[in-house]
Amino acid sequence: MAFTPQFLDELRTRVGLADLVGKRVKLTRKGREHSGLCPFHKEKTPSFTVNEEKGFYHCFGCGAHGSAIDFVMNTDSLSFPEAVRRLASDAGLAVPEDTPEERERSRQRQTLYDVMDQAAAFYEKTLRMPDGKAALAYLKDRGLSDQTITRFRLGFAPDGRNVIKGALVRDGATEEQLIAAGLLINPEDPSRQPYDRFRGRVMFPIADRRGRIIAFGGRILGDGEPKYLNSPETPLFHKGQVLFGWDQAKDKARQTGTVIVTEGYMDVIALSQGGFENAVAPLGTALTEEQIGELWKLVPEPVLCFDGDAAGGRASARAAERVLALLKPGFSLRFAELPAGEDPDSLLSAHGAEAMTRVLAGASPLSEVLWAMESRGRSLSIPEARAALQKRLDDHVRRIGDPTVRAHFSKSFRDRLWKSSPGRSRQSGIDRGSPAHIGAQAAPATKVDPLRDAQRTLVGIIINHPDIFHDVEEQFGSVGFEDPSLDRLRQALIEMLSGDSGFDSQALLAELGRRGLAESVEALFQDALLRSNRQIRPEAVNDDVQATWDQSYAQIQRAAVQAEVERQVDTDDYSEESLQRIMAIKRAELEQADED
């Protein structure tokens, strides 16, 4: 059977290609793409890539290439219709029959897209006319530039009952089409005529993933209720599945690896104008499961940045609870806390982009938010209180569907409960004068950690000398950092520098700041070792930089091998391979000593 282009397009946008392929191939995220071993031919080195943004996979080894539909056809030996039906079933999407009636529905949907675009153009034009003078002044008073107003296609709906109806009917639309598009209200009383839904409102067009206008949000000018009014559910618009600003934010979100979720239209628009072009917002409702799924198609950890008031706190709590059942390894939410009484728009207006960057840099992981929700304002000094806290946390953990994620959350909370007990606090902090802690008390405040220093050196080199990245990309990607802040820097650098990025050191620092990593960079370069190491400074010559890289990377490798050997010794795993690795470590240490 034949499927309509509109249905196939909807299916491709609903299906997460990386999730689909990841069920059969172990994928590693690298910049904007995922890579892994090709499922279509035998190989030892990954040459298979998945580009979620463009919606295709490609193998540079065997040439396999295609979409999600092609992948299912080839891996499950299905025909095209069978693959489409399989994917549609998994995505919860009804397959339309190729009938004259369905073709007519498809034609009607296209007509509604055209009607909505005409309405947006009318509202835009009206904003610049005398009727829109007050609306334009309102937007300018909110600090929006003409460029921003044009970019988001903001407009004005005049305060009349037949304005949009008259304009679009004159252009060939019918009242039935305008009602279906949500632009007119059709009274229950048959003696009354349909009339404009949006009257006396600043208009915010809402677009789908492809940038097509599917709905509007309108803000009343002056007094009146409701303050904000959205389009109703229509054949084009399903509020719980759409995020305002998605079409504008998706490219920047993929480039930066971050998407900011705010509460409202103006927050998204103000953030975009302030340089944070990766912001979206739900449409006046709590974040839905469908919207979380859409966000995860962009980035693995969206940052929620709701208003710093009680309502914003409740919205964050609802999102934290709702995401639990959806969690899977590598995918979660982070939560940025705004100062009391502030929203993104007001914070940017009063304190600028740097303040917003600091807020985003301080975003907390989901586990921290759940802990704070349940422990804030409660004493943990007695066993009964800690037991009650444990029960509340366990209730959250039980809602996590993925067993691996559930186990890690459970362990994290239990470890934190143990550390919060009064006896543990005395043992680790107050009771330092006992004989058992005399040595610890006399130890220097800053403990030397050669492995951590070597890892920090690698990151510092990449930031100061990004031109070295392609020569050491494989080594940099293979190193695992235990310090979460340092590892976030490493991941961001890999994403930014993969491909022909053209970043120099200054551009790199600016982009890291935009990603909310300015404090991590500052902490890195406050390290005494990095400050004193002339061989990694921006003015250092390439030979010195490369030599420092080689030395630091070798130190990390030796530590990794040594740890593995110690594990084998602890488990009585004596083998020829173990002996050879120990000897290799000793030789490397002797060679290093000779060089020093």
Image (cartoon, grey):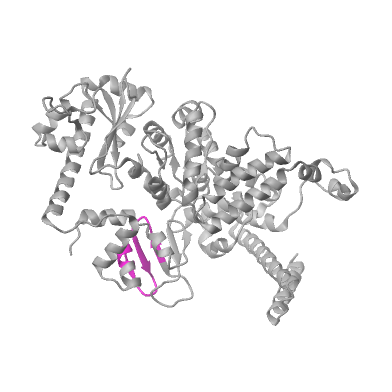
Q: Is residue 516 visible?
A: yes
- Up the image or down, 353 lies above or below 515; here it is above
Q: Position of residue 3 (x, y in %)?
A: 20, 60
Tell me the quarter of the picture where residue 8 sits. bottom left
Tell me the quarter of the picture where residue 50 sits. bottom left
> Along the horizontal axis of the image, is 149 left or right of 431?
left
> Along the horizontal axis of the image, is 243 left or right of 572?
left
**Most foreground residue, 409 or 190:** 190
- Residue at 54% x, 27% y is 340
Which image quarter is the N terminus in?
bottom left
- Up the image or down, 131 lies above or below 276; here it is above
- Up the image or down, 397 lies above or below 228; here it is below
Q: Is residue 305 visible?
A: no
The question of residue 62 being in magenta is answered with yes
- Residue at 48% x, 75% y is 44
Q: Position of residue 426 (x, y in %)?
A: 80, 42
Q: Position of residue 289 (x, y in %)?
A: 41, 47
- Residue at 53% x, 65% y is 474
Q: Position of residue 552 (x, y in %)?
A: 66, 61
> Along the horizontal axis of the image, is 154 left or right of 388?
left
Which image quarter is the C terminus in?
bottom right
In the image as oriented, which residue stretches furthest toward the right? 435
Q: Magenta stretch: give its range.
A: 49-71
In the image as oriented, which residue stretches furthest toward the bottom? 576
**Most foreground residue, 12 or 554:** 12
